Image (spheres, rainbow, N blue to C red):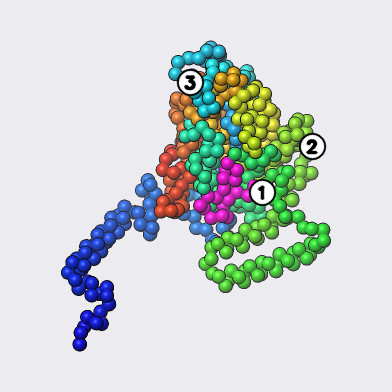
Amino acid sequence: MNLSENISLHGRRLLDRRNFLSTAGMSTASLSLTSLLHQDGLLASDAKTVSGQEPIRPNIDPNDPYAPREPHFSSAAKQVLVIYLPGAVSHVDTFDYKPDLFKLHGKKPPNIPAVTFEGPSGNIAKPFWNFKPRGETGKMVSDLLPNLAELVDDFCFIHSLSTETSAHPQGENFMNTGFTMEGFPSFGAWVTYALGTESQELPAFVAINDPRGLARSGKNNFGNGFLPAAFQGTDFSAIHPPNNLYRPDSVTPEADRATVDLLQRLNARHLQQNPGDANLAGRIASYELAGRMQTSIPEVMDLSKETAATMKAYGVEGGSKLRGEYAKNCIFARRLIEKGVRVVQLFNGSDPSGGNGVTNWDSHANILDTHSMQAEIMDQPTAALIADMKQRGLLEHTLVVWATEFGRMPFLQANGTGRDHNPDAFTCFLTGAGVKRATSYGESDAFGFKAAVNKTTVYDFNATLLHLMGLNHERLTYYHNGLERRLTNVHGSVVHDILRG
């Protein structure tokens, strides 16, 4: 009997000495590589972050992805309100006072670049608005924002921010997602992925768009990227409520309730037949939340319950139509925070047709007129929102972030009326839970041209925001395409000097 006839082709090849040694060598090398990967923590079963730490992944129940979860460590901030201003607010005309601009007004000192983002540069220009000392601290703030100026003793300014891009779409992406490219999760998505929400009647993350529309990067600013779809922001506003929430008059409340009950029973049965299907569970949870929103959203958006004094304080009446609509959005934001929504992102500015200072803060020309128009819309309602939240005690557990994607140049463009993009220095401020009050951190140089003291990157900024929410930015990760991805990529340090002890 020929034994080789009972051996497979692959087995017969192993009887050949050369093939046997080749296969054994490759197998030994594979085992060695596996051992090395295990030692370095690079195997999926033994994941490590880029800093060598174990990731902290939230324990998410697929049947209830929005359930509240504990932070990595105790923190004062339980919710966050992000007030985002697309278009790049001029720091040297608002909060970053530079006396040297008055001395050099109309001149072109050395080391000023001949060409910037949109073309040739002009001469140094003093602020277009007067600065005055404000509050008990005497913080210098311009007359462009008189209402926010009254609250400076509650703010923590960061004057040394810098970013990696001078283009608006990439700048918005970078500030809101930590990457200039699209497809990455937004800050709000990371927070709700980690923490869920206390409110089970409303979305965990709501993005309130400007009355004029979406910002340049659109829904990427509040998208979920590669995180589960449950953690994307739900966008609506005071004038554009979610679609299909209202019951048709032809359907009685009893019939509507019976339909919802039937759907819940059918969904539960379907889920029992498909245990462990996270996508199915997520969709069912989303549908059920939409059903609960049919009653919760109309209640939140009913401004008839607000007092006349509140409506006046926010500036709903008496100004431009856009200010009135933005003011309603501000009231809406406060009510969502009151209802326990984890993340609210409020936009002041849009970009449906390029901006150019008309729909947002992008003032390449006629900055005196365009910034004035945007300030009329933003200043009073935003100041009223922050003051109202403080009066109601909401700032005890809510972090408030006022941010833009970059600053503007201390010199004019060649047209002599506008300021170009400045990625090397800009100002944002924080207030509320966990933040030091009446603080100014970092400095730009004498002209507001570049960050000079305690330079703070967008990575540092986002790391600090996550820290204030009780989250370790180095360990809050999601495994995607072979990498432990995080909001701050492989960079960022918490700015501990602005944290309240």
> In percent of the image, x 74 and y 50: which residue is there?
299
Residue 269: x %, y % from top left: 62, 71
- Kindly report which numbered mark, 1 or 3, lies closer to the viewer in this rendering: 3
Specify the amino acid type for callout 1: Lys
Answer above or below: position of 40 versus 451: below
Which residue is most to the bottom?
1
Q: Label 3: how many residues lie within 10 Å, few (<14), some (14-19) or many (20+)? A: few
403 up-or-down from 479: above or below: above
Task: Assess whether residue 227 is covered by the magenta stretch.
Answer: yes
Residue 443 spot, x, y in % from top left: 48, 25
Q: Which mark is residue 308?
A: 2
Dot 2 falls on a residue whose secondary structure is helix
Nearest to the eye among marks 2 and 3: give it. Answer: 3
Q: Which residue sits at x=49%, y=40%?
A: 180
* Residue where numbered disc 1 is placed: 339
The amino acid marked with disc number 3 is Ala
Q: Residue furthest left?
A: 17
Q: State the separation of the CA atoms marked 2 and 1.
A: 21 Å
Q: Position of residue 495 (x, y in %)?
A: 46, 35
> In screen coordinates, is 406 left or right of 203?
left
Segment tinted magenta in the rendering: 217-235
Cα distance, mark 2 to mark 3? 53 Å
Find disc 3 in the rendering and name its residue: 114
